Image: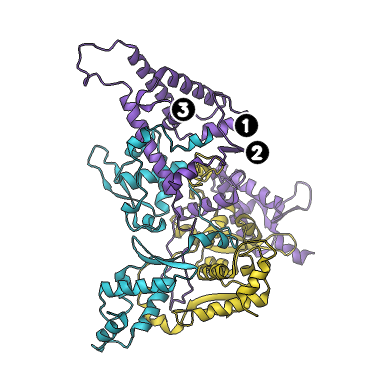
Chain colours: A yellow, B cyan, C purple
Amino acid sequence: MSDPAVEMTQQTDSGISALNAEQFRKVVEAALLTAEEPLSLSDLKKLTEIPLENRWLERLLEELSDRYADSGVELNRVASGWRFRVRPELQPHLDRLSNEKPPRYSRAVMETLAIIAYRQPVTRGDIEEIRGVTVSSQILKTLEARGWVEVIGTRDVPGRPELLATTKQMLDDFNLRSLQELPALEEMSGLLAQGSLLPDEAAA
Amino acid sequence: MSDPAVEMTQQTDSGISALNAEQFRKVVEAALLTAEEPLSLSDLKKLTEIPLENRWLERLLEELSDRYADSGVELNRVASGWRFRVRPELQPHLDRLSNEKPPRYSRAVMETLAIIAYRQPVTRGDIEEIRGVTVSSQILKTLEARGWVEVIGTRDVPGRPELLATTKQMLDDFNLRSLQELPALEEMSGLLAQGSLLPDEAAA
Amino acid sequence: MTQNALLLDPAEPVARIHGEPLLEIPQDLYIPPDALEVVLESFQGPLDLLLYLIRKHNLDVLDIPMAQLTRQYMAYIEMMKQHRLELAAEYLLMAAVLIEIKSRMLLPRPSKASEEEAEDPRAELMRRLLEYEQMKLAAQRLNELPQAGRDFELVQVLIERTAETRLPEVGVEDLRQAWLGLLARAKLNAHHKVRREELSVREQMTRVLRMLRHGEFEPFENLFEIEGSVPHLVVTFIAILELAKENLVEITQTETLGKIYVRSSRGNDSAD
C-alpha cells in the first residue's frame, strides 16, 4: 500500500526518531509557511533525522498541496523548490491592506548588511562563514539595489571572489558621517545570556 | 443558526460587491498568512467594501482558526490583532533548517523588562532602585530596538525622567492579549516562606 | 507548578566549566578556581548576592542574622577583588549599609519608646530584598514564555506586492541589533568585537580599494588624503598594509628608494 503514513512508520521501525508521518506533515507545512525562500527536497529532508525518499516526500507535498486546494494560498513547485504563495486572483483584495505599514528587511538582510558594514571589505564567503548559512544572491541584490552595498574589488585567491563594502549612500541614509559613527560593539556581549549559568537561564 | 455565509449574502444583497462569504474567508486567510504584523479587525475590514460587523468577522476568524486545528500552524489572537504562528512544539524541528534565531537575552535585560512590564510606567531610577544596580543605556536600547519598550512620557519631578512602558509588540511577541495575561507575580508572603522557589536552591 | 519543577530540576547544572556541568554551588566559600569567576560574575548586583547568601544558608529573611550575613558578604567581596572582577560601586555601598545595620542592632534598644516607632534597622533591607526577588522570579517566568522568533516563528507567505514603492526604513540601532543576533548565535564574542579604531581602518581600506578600482598602478602617496591629520595618515597607512596582508592590493617598487606603486590585486590578470 502506498500510503505515506504507512511507509513512514516502516521507516521509523529503524528506531531513529519518534516523528510519525502525520506530525511530519505538520512540520513540513510549518516550514513552508515560514520560509523566506522556496524549500528544496534536500532542505525538507533536514527537518528530520529519518532518511526520506524523494518519491515519498513528493507525495507528501502533493497531499499537502491538496489540503490547500480550498484556501487563500497555494503550494507551488518552482525552480528551486516548493513554496506557498497567495492565489493571484486574491491579490487585488490584499492590495487594499498593504499601503500602510512600512515593510521591513528580513533578519538575513540586516545581518548581511551589518557584517559588510563592520567587517568590510568582505567576500560573500566571509559573510557565510560568520552567519553560518548560505547568503542568497537575493539578499545581496536587495542591498545593492538599495544602493547600500557595492563591489569594490576582488580578493586575490582562487575564484577571485568579489569584495563588498558599504557605500556613501548607506552612510547618508543612516545619517552617519563615517563608519566610525557606527555603534562600537565592545560592550554588547553583556546583553546576551551567557548560557553557561543557571541563574542566567531563567528558562530551562 | 446564524451562518456567516448567509449573513454575508444578506449583506451582499445591498449589491456593493460580488465577494461571497466563502471567497472572503479565503481573502482573510491569505491576508493573515502574508501579513508581517498581526491584523486587527479594522485592518481586516479594509479587505472589502462591504461594511462588516465585528461579531461576524470574529466568528469568521474562529472558523478559520478551526480549519487549522489539524495543521502545523495556528491562528492566535494577540494584543494587536490576529496572526498565524508555528505551533511551538514543532519549532525544534524547524530549527534544524536554519540557526537564525534572535538572541536570548541576559538576566539583566530580562529583569529590566520584567520591572517595566509589571511596574509600568517606571523611570530608569525606579528600575535601578529595585535591581540595586545601574541600568546601562545599552539594556534599554536593546529593549527599545526590539520594539518591546518605549518612552510614554516624563515624570513631573526635577530632571523630568522618562517614563517607560511595554509596547503592544511586546505582548504580541509573547503571544499575549494584554498585560493581565502576564504570569502572576509571586506574592511577597510566598517569598518569605523560605525561598522554595529559588533556582539557587536547586543547586544546594 | 511547572515552573517550580523546572527551577528545582536537580539535573540542571549551576555552571559549566570547560563544558563539564557543575551541579551545585559548593558549600561554604570553596569554589573551584575555574568556576569562581563564572559564579561571581553571575550575580546581578549586591541584592542578588545577598539573596543568594540568605537562601543558601537558609537564613530567615524576617530575622536576618546580620553578623553572619555581613561576614559572608564581605568574604565574597574580597574574592571578587582578588579576582580583579570589576566591582561595581553598588557592592561597596551595600557593604557600608550592612555594617551600619549591624552596628545599629548592637545599640541597646530605647526601652521607653513605643514598639511601633522603634523600627527594625533591617526592615528597609528586607523590603528591598523581597521586592527584588519578586522581580527576579517574574523575569524568569517571563523568559519561560514562548517568544516570537526564539521559540516559534511567525507565518509569512510570499506575496508579490504590486509596485513596491515604500522601502524599509532602517536605523543604526537595527544594525547593532543584527550584529547582536549574530554574536548570540555564533559565539563570536572572543574575536569579533568591533572597536572604533578598527572601524576607521576598515573605512580607509574601503576608500583605498575604491580608488584602485580602475586596476592601474597608483602612486603610493596619492592614496593619502593630504589634508588629513597625522593620526588619519597613520590609519590610512595601516589600512594599506592590511590590504596587502589580505592580498587585496599589490605594492611594488621598481628600484631601491624609488617610487612606490599600489594597485588592486585584480589587475594581476593582465600583468600575468
Label whose residue precedes the other's in the sequence (1 or 2) = 2
Q: Is residue C114 above or below residue C169?
A: above
Discs 1 and 2 carry the same chain letter: yes
Q: Amino acid at mark 1?
A: Asp
Q: CB of mark 1 within 8 Å of CB of mark 2?
A: yes
**Residue placed under numbered mark 2 in the picture:** C18
**Residue placed under numbered mark 3 in the picture:** C53
Question: Residue shown at 49%/63% (left/top)?
Answer: A106
Question: Residue shown at 55%/50% (left/top)?
Answer: C184
Distance between mark 1 and mark 2 Cα atoms: 9 Å
Distance between mark 3 and mark 1 Cα atoms: 20 Å
**Residue placed under numbered mark 1 in the picture:** C34
Q: Is residue C227 above or below residue C113?
A: below
- Viewer-closest of C233 and B64: B64
Please state if A21 lies on the left or on the right of A157 as rendered.
left
For the C terminus of chain C, the image quarter is: bottom right
Please state if A34 lies on the left or on the right of C213 as rendered.
left
Q: Position of residue A140 (x, y in %)?
A: 57, 66
- Viewer-closest of A170 and C17: C17
